[in-house]
Image (tube, rainbow, N blue to C red):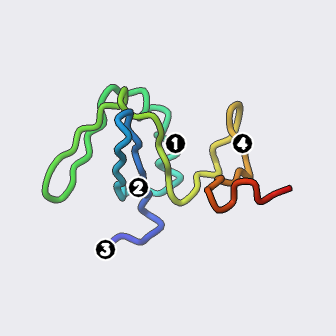
């Protein structure tokens, strides 16, 4: 069995408002190294134990990775960001 560190949880958010998450058996570092190339592909193929899923990247509006991929740096990258929820909206004055 692979260790937890050798998996990256990836959530795809689609144009139609749906989302789905997968545990991909690559380390977060390896995933972030492949991310730009993956998103430039028209289709991603994910082989699961009982089926194969095909994801049309043109229908993906957001991708979330867990654990955080702090190694990604450069233009358009913002650090120390906090998500605003209904409970935290307006809490800072």
Q: Residue furthest left?
A: 50
Distance between mark 2 and mark 1 Cα atoms: 11 Å
For label 2, the crowd category at 10 Å Cα-Cα, with few meaning under 14, some 14 to 19 and many 20 or more, is some
For label 3, the crowd category at 10 Å Cα-Cα, with few meaning under 14, some 14 to 19 and many 20 or more, is few
- Residue in view at x 43 percent, y 32 percent: 39
* Coordinates of residue 14 in the picture (x, y in percent): 37, 38
* Coordinates of residue 35 in the picture (x, y in percent): 48, 39
| Residue 26, disc | 2
- Which badge, 4 or 1, comes first in the chain's sequence? 1
Element under disc 3:
loop
User: Horizontal placement of 53 versus 2: left or right?
Assistant: left
Quadrant of residue 42 within the rendered picture: top left
Which mark's residue is nearer the viewer, 4 or 3?
Answer: 4
* Coordinates of residue 11 in the picture (x, y in percent): 41, 50
| Residue 78, disc | 4
Q: Are marks 4 and 3 in contact (CB under 8 Å)?
A: no
Q: Quadrant of the C terminus?
A: bottom right
- Which badge, 2 or 4, comes first in the chain's sequence? 2
- Residue in view at x 64 percent, y 48 percent: 71
Residue 2 or 20: which is nearer the viewer? 20
Q: Which residue is mark 3?
A: 1
For label 1, the crowd category at 10 Å Cα-Cα, with few meaning under 14, some 14 to 19 and many 20 or more, is some
Which mark's residue is nearer the viewer, 4 or 1?
Answer: 4
**Residue 65, placed above or below residue 77:** below
Element under disc 1:
helix
Element under disc 4:
loop
- Which badge, 3 or 1, comes first in the chain's sequence? 3
Distance between mark 4 and mark 1 Cα atoms: 18 Å
- Residue in view at x 81 percent, y 57 percent: 92
| Residue 33, disc | 1
């Amino acid at each position: 069995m692979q260790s937890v560190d050798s998996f990256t949880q990836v959530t795809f958010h689609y144009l139609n408002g749906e989302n789905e998450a997968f545990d991909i058996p690559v380390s977060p570092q390896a995933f972030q190294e492949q991310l730009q190339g993956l998103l430039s592909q028209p289709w991603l193929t994910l082989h699961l134990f009982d089926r194969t899923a095909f994801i049309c990247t043109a229908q993906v509006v957001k991708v979330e990775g867990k654990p955080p991929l702090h190694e990604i740096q450069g233009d358009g990258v913002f650090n120390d960001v906090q998500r605003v929820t209904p409970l935290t909206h307006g809490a800072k004055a």
